[in-house]
């Protein structure tokens, strides 16, 4: 059983997303330490990319900040190896397909095998993932497929078979970004995916509160923009306090 499945079978899980290198790699390292102290067992690490297709202004701006500071994919891989060695947490790199294509699918899978438990590629449609998945499977890295609010029943059944982690259920039509509430349609859609899926389901996009974490009918919930908003690039100490306060307000 994959490490992520072991975590998800215990209880409903909060998975934070951090953009690597915002505002520095050393700061990201400190933020992960805070998350681990809060009890977090799985983390998404965003690899900065200049042309994100689904990210709202909060994540886009954090990526731009990191890119201007010269953060490269290899920097993030080295950081992730260090975090994996130190904390034994599940690490899920999230990146765009150009970075994989540029390196080659096999080389990419081999490179991240030292730290990655799964990988998220938001601009890679499931039907095009057949080039990547076999290389990931060779290194026991789970591919995480997406479900969107207009997904068909047969597609939920299909993608459920092709991950050893979870289905990433996008909660809304649109881009990432903290939201104060969800419509009834969102809850109905997530219940539908959960009912049809034979796999674990994680809800992402817009999560910002304990109420949402508890009410969303999924096995895990991913928090990104609301977490990044706690980061003040000019005050790392205060950022750590803010992150700790937000995470504890949700899971305690």
Image: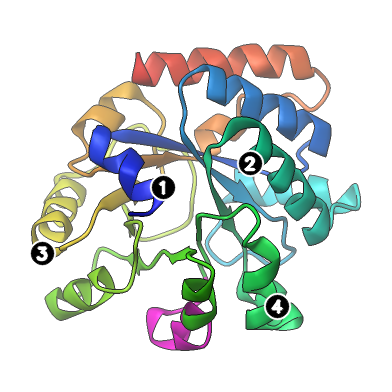
Give residue 159's position: percent from left, percent from top. 28, 73
Check disc 1 and report the residue beneath it: 3
Is residue 15 something that shows in the picture? yes
- Say which label, 1 or 2, has the lower sequence index: 1
Give residue 72's position: percent from left, percent from top. 83, 58
Q: What's drawn in magenta, residue-wise? A: 123-133
Where 50 falls versus 241 (above or below)?
Answer: below
**Residue at left 36%, top 32%?**
180
- Say which label, 4 or 2, has the lower sequence index: 2
- Say which label, 4 or 3, has the lower sequence index: 4
Cα gap from disc 1 to disc 2, whole angstroms: 12 Å
Check disc 3 and report the residue beneath it: 196
Cα gap from disc 3 to disc 2, whole angstroms: 33 Å
Closer to viewer: mark 3 or mark 1? 1
Looking at the rendered structure, the secondary structure element under dot 1 is helix
- Say which label, 3 or 2, has the lower sequence index: 2
Is residue 231 something that shows in the picture? no
Where 48 falls versus 131 (above or below)?
Answer: above
Give residue 114's position: percent from left, percent from top. 66, 56
Check disc 4 and report the residue beneath it: 107
Q: How crowded is mark 3: few (under 14 residues within 10 Å), some or many (20 or more)?
A: some
Cα gap from disc 4 to disc 2, whole angstroms: 20 Å
**Residue at left 64%, top 24%?**
33
Looking at the rendered structure, the secondary structure element under dot 2 is helix
Cα gap from disc 4 to disc 3, whole angstroms: 35 Å
- Say which label, 4 or 1, has the lower sequence index: 1
Where 166 falls versus 31 (above or below)?
Answer: below
């Amino acid at each position: 059983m994959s490490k992520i499945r072991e975590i998800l079978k215990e209880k409903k899980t909060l998975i934070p997303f951090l953009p690597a290198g915002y505002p520095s790699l050393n700061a990201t390292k400190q933020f992960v330490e805070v998350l681990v102290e809060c009890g977090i067992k799985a983390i998404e690490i965003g690899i900065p990319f200049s042309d994100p297709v689904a990210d709202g202004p909060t994540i886009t701006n954090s990526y731009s900040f990191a890119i201007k500071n010269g953060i490269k994919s290899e920097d993030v891989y080295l950081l992730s190896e260090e975090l994996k060695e130190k904390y034994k947490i599940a690490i899920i790199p999230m990146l765009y397909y150009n970075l994989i294509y540029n390196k080659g699918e096999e080389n990419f899978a081999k490179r991240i095998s030292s730290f990655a438990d799964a990988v998220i590629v938001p601009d890679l449609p499931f039907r095009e993932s057949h080039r990547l998945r076999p290389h990931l499977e060779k290194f026991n890295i789970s591919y995480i497929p997406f479900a969107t609010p207009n997904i068909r029943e047969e597609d939920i059944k299909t993608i459920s078979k092709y991950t050893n982690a979870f289905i990433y259920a996008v909660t809304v039509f649109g881009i990432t970004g903290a939201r104060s509430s969800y419509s009834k349609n969102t809850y109905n859609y997530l219940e539908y995916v959960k009912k049809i899926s034979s796999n674990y389901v994680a809800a992402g996009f817009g999560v910002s509160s304990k109420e949402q974490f508890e009410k969303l009918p999924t096995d895990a919930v991913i928090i990104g923009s609301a977490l990044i908003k706690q980061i003040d690039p000019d005050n790392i100490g205060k950022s750590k306090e803010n992150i700790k306060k937000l995470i504890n307000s949700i899971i305690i």
